[in-house]
Amino acid sequence: MDGVGATAREVVGEPQSVLRHRPFALFWFARIASILSFQMLAVAVGWQLYSLTGRALDLGLVGLAQFLPMVLLTLLVGHVADRYPHRSILLTCQLVEAAAAAILVFETATGRIDRLSIYIIMAAVGAARAFELPTMAAIIPGLVPRALVPTATAWSASANQTAQIVGPAVGGLLYMLGPVVVYATGIGCWLAGSALVALLPADKRERPLEPFSIRSLFGGFSFVRHDRVILGILSLDLFAVLLGGATALLPIFARDVLGTGPWGLGLLRSAPAVGALAMSLVLARRPLQPPIGPTLFRVLIAFGIATIVFGLSTHIMLSFCALAVLGAADVVSVVIRFSLVQLRTPDAMRGRVSAVNALFVGTTNTLGDFESGVVAALLGAVPAVVVGGVGTVAVAVIWMMFLYPELRRLHSFEDVAPAADARPRSV
């Protein structure tokens, strides 16, 4: 990892250089289009399902429907991402997601929509995203020089948060015209994203391929299990997000706690992304300064406290601000975690390790939705969110002080040496 320190210093001097790389610019806009579509879909599905059933548990089951295919496909996803062109994988995923939205249009327009069909369709979306999310992570080092990976990560996060701001707000407003309008708009955005992905250059880097075997199939898990830095980071995120997730309960807070309609739901869903976008733009221009270890734990504790404030709030602007702080804290954590994982993982294993990362990160959001729905059904929405926020703070303290103190001692990205042995070990 020679030159990483010099590289980081160069990035500080050229904060916008990543967008001068045409492949990354195409990827950046394609990422916005895809996430914009998914966020609009999430708002419409959540409001439509809650209108159909009025049950918190059903909102949690939407998260479970997306979580299960991600878990079941993790091993296959990593292997595919390491063996096939990233451009082709992303293109296929976005076309599948557009097709799922088209089915929602048909089911809703014909009056045949019910909770079972919603679960099945969202499971299909979850399966596509199981391939899309780790591939989006794995493709970045091939779009920019290694020197710019941390900055590209911040810009990628800004694309994600931009879409999460605009998507829910637009979805909530368009829902006033009916869910069909939301789903049809999502189809258009996914098709636009597909067109941008199709313009990406073919990846000409040579990636040594291992013969297919059980050992290579589980290679990502084995690599993570033997690397305490990556394992500590991913497990920290797993438990923090699992406990602190409140997104699935936003329809309940919007209607029953804050007394708003679909526009209020869209506003609440946009709030974390507002804070995250502001922070990601700051990080894109002013990369993180040492010490990164203590910063990681500080932002996770802030995430938990903001969750508690949101759970106790009865005013929509206070709720909005709490969610914005939550989003800002989360994006700092994302940039630190993603950069560490990518810089420690060799090209030949990046797909499999990214798949494990997606399992820990992406699926914990949906599993966290399920957990929130179950706890809310038992205790109520407000206690569920407050307990989750307290749990997030507790997890951060336990990891920092007892389980992975080496994470607390990380000073800068320069201190993170690459893994000594990148070959999968026996499992």
Image (cartoon, rainbow, N blue to C red):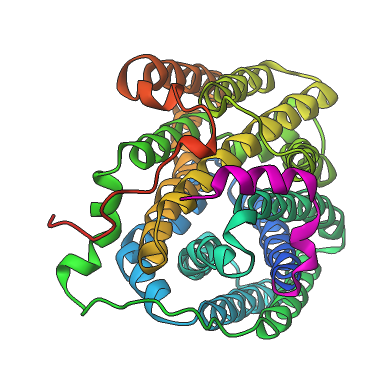
Above or below 237: residue 91 = below
**Residue 425, located in which quarter of the rendered image?**
bottom left
Numbered range of the magenta stretch: 1-23
At x 79%, y 71%, the residue is 185
Q: Nearer the viewer, residue 204 or 35?
A: 204
Seen from this angle, which residue lies furthest left? 426
Relative to 376, 418 lies left or right: left
Residue 245: x, y in percent? Answer: 54, 35
Above or below 109: residue 126 = above
Q: Is residue 248 visible?
A: no
**Residue 156, located in which quarter of the rendered image?**
bottom right
Q: Is residue 72 visible?
A: yes
At x 61%, y 55%, the residue is 147
The kind of secondary structure the magenta stretch mainly shows is: helix
Residue 398: x, y in percent? Answer: 37, 17
Relative to 69, 420 lies left or right: left
Q: Nearer the viewer, residue 423 or 238?
A: 423
Above or below 394: residue 410 = below
Residue 10: x, y in percent? Answer: 71, 48
Q: Nearer the viewer, residue 409 or 182?
A: 409
Residue 191: x, y in percent? Answer: 72, 80
Q: Quadrant of the C terminus?
A: bottom left
